[in-house]
Amino acid sequence: MGAVPSTPRHASTATETAEYLIGTFVGEKSFPLASDFWQKLLELPLTLRWAPDRVSQACQLFAQNNRHTRHLAKILIHLSWCLQEAIQTSGAPSPVYMKAVNAVYVSSVFLKYIIENSQSDTIEELCLSLHENEPVPKGFVADQRIENLVMYNVLTFLGSVDVSPTTSLLHQELLNFMLVAMSTQLLSGPSPGPKDVHPFIDAAMSQESSLVSMVVRRLLLNYITRPRIPSSSAASYSIFSEESQPGVLQRVGSAAANFVLLPFNYLVSSNGEGSRSQLADWSLHVLLILIHYHKCVVSDESITDRSDDSATSDSVSKVNTYFTVNPYSKALENARDVEFDRLDVEGNAQNGPVVRLPFASLFDTLGMCLADETAVLLLYSLVQGNSDFLEYVLVRTDLDTLLVPILETLYNASRRTSNQIYMLLIILLILSQDSSFNASIHKMILPGVPWYKEHLLHQTSLGSLMVIILIRTVQYNLSKLRDVYLHTTCLATLANMAPHVHRLSAYASQRLVSLFYMLSRKYNKLVELRDDKVQIKAISTGDGLVEDMSAELQIYTDFLRIVLEILNAILTYALPRNPEVVYAIMHRQEVFEPFKNHPRFAELLENIYNVLDFFNSRMDAQRLEGEWSVEKVLQFIINNCRSWRGEGMKMFTQLHFSYEQESHPEEFFIPYVWQLVLSRR
């Protein structure tokens, strides 16, 4: 790697000494654990600046020699010892911490290179063990698993030592180390298999539940408090690289292929808002990777108790495999609000330690950060997995803190990823499963919605805005994404909201009727195409196109029926409170006419025409001087709503949709989380 002196000159500068020590570290000579070489290496003020090509040369040389020297294993052991010393001397002078920072920094650089350039599925190049004849210090257990040792100490430091100006740099570098160490997942396929080798994240999964809870709590507190590293600490630490030069994964089988893994210069500020905290962002990244990891193992034939829902038997290759319980996911599910002790109130015992968090601060932080896709995924993970946090959200009186950013992001769907849109829609669906939520959002009035450009929304309820945005999302999907799942989720949420609608705005009511018209046009086109294909089929042998057309037609038939059921629910359970909906139906009543005799829609349209007949007959009977203006018609509807008794209305079972996570969520979430992490590095 260039001209590195074999021995340091007598009057060497700090830079020359650093060059020599790094050169020796990556070289052929193996230094035992007890050698004073390690102390010299880790006590240097590592401000050495190398160009990326020299860093690459050093990494290549290190990878060649590591099988013999086992220097990666040794520096990881020294990192563990440094962290133990730092934990024991919490708040002590900075040299203790800087030695640990140097150890974790050097470890990250070379560990990253080996993972990226591994030539085997088992990452044998890591060599996470010492040679049998390696001399070890007294008291050191030679046969312990080094990945367990280092992850235990990394997690213990992160979970037990508070972030302060003294410790913040070490906290950040340890988070970065974890991201590097856990990136072995990028070498596997998107679906975890029993032969996948992930030594560091598996070591993290094997820790005691008390430590896991401490780590989850600390990572979330970092995200909430958003601490910053003092500029003096960050500026003085620039080992190895003058600029941010990304390393690219050479071989990956996951959905994160073609993404950059990690840059060599770890302290480059990330792009984004001025309020961004790198330590907060990396804490969230580590948490998301930990909670969504699933380890696939081959079961012992003697095991008959499989309580995990993820156990599979749908194919020969998966008969004897199952997923182990993820302790970090369980810890997040068990998180409780520091302000309210449900255990004391209800007297329920908990399985394992409880993570105590300030839900109010977490709620507010999420509300501020939902433009970031990782924050959306955290919110999803909480409302989907933690019933206490979901309950907390539902009783908040300022639901606009979360909902308005969600709706604004959906409004800008064209500038967002499809995965982010899905996550947001699922969050809304989960919230809409609660009747109190559906009622309360119509009582909250927004003075204005400045980001909505198509129509002036003044004094609009939060519920009306939600209806408008969900319908707009369906419209966007019709023209761009054309995703059936997205349609279904939007309509399911609207259906859950329908019986509780209160004073829906004129614009939202118009959009609701227009939604039926939009879907009916799509339906009619499909009918025409199907009929054309049937005629073509008479002189053709292939019938695949006809089958596809029929399947799509069935989907849109179901969509139209759901919209009719939404309208029915409003008219059946909430007509007196929604004169604008009645007005919108009366104004566009012709859009329903073609479907009066449709076998799937007839009974639902009977109710709609029952309402139309009631109001139309009274309008016809009322003598009026001059024309019927919009204001006069609306006032007429309001007056006659008082005499509406719902006579002749057929009662249908209320639609209620709930969200259920897929049986193998890891196939989506593991690649998705890494994609988010890598796109922000």
Image (cartoon, rainbow, N blue to C red):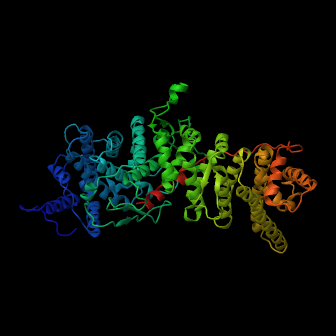
What residue do we see at 49% from left, 41% from top? 360
Write down the quadrant of residue 159 in the picture. top left
Residue projecting furthest to the right: 621
Residue 190 percent location from the top left of the image: 51, 56
Q: Nearer the viewer, residue 578 or 189?
A: 578
Q: Residue at x 78, y 68 (%)?
A: 525
Quadrant where the C terminus is found in the figure: bottom left
Q: How many marks?
A: 0
Query: Residue extending furthest front?
Result: 625
Residue 118: quarter of image: bottom left
Residue 598: x percent and y percent? Answer: 87, 57
Q: As displayed, is residue 272 above or below residue 131?
A: below
Which residue shows up at 67% across the image and 41% down it? 435
Whether residue 316 appears in this view of the structure is yes
Image vertical order of residue 235 relative to residue 397, above or below = below
At 62% from the left edge and 45% from the top edge, which residue is drawn? 431
Residue 241 higher or lower than 282, as above or below: below
Is residue 8 shown above or below 382? below
Residue 585 showing in the rendered view: no
Along the viewing direction, whichever of 286 and 494 lies nearer the viewer = 494
Q: Position of residue 633 (x, y in %)?
A: 82, 56
Q: Residue 583 location in percent, x, y?
A: 80, 55
Quadrant location of the N terminus in the rendered image: bottom left
Q: Is residue 55 left or right of residue 624?
A: left
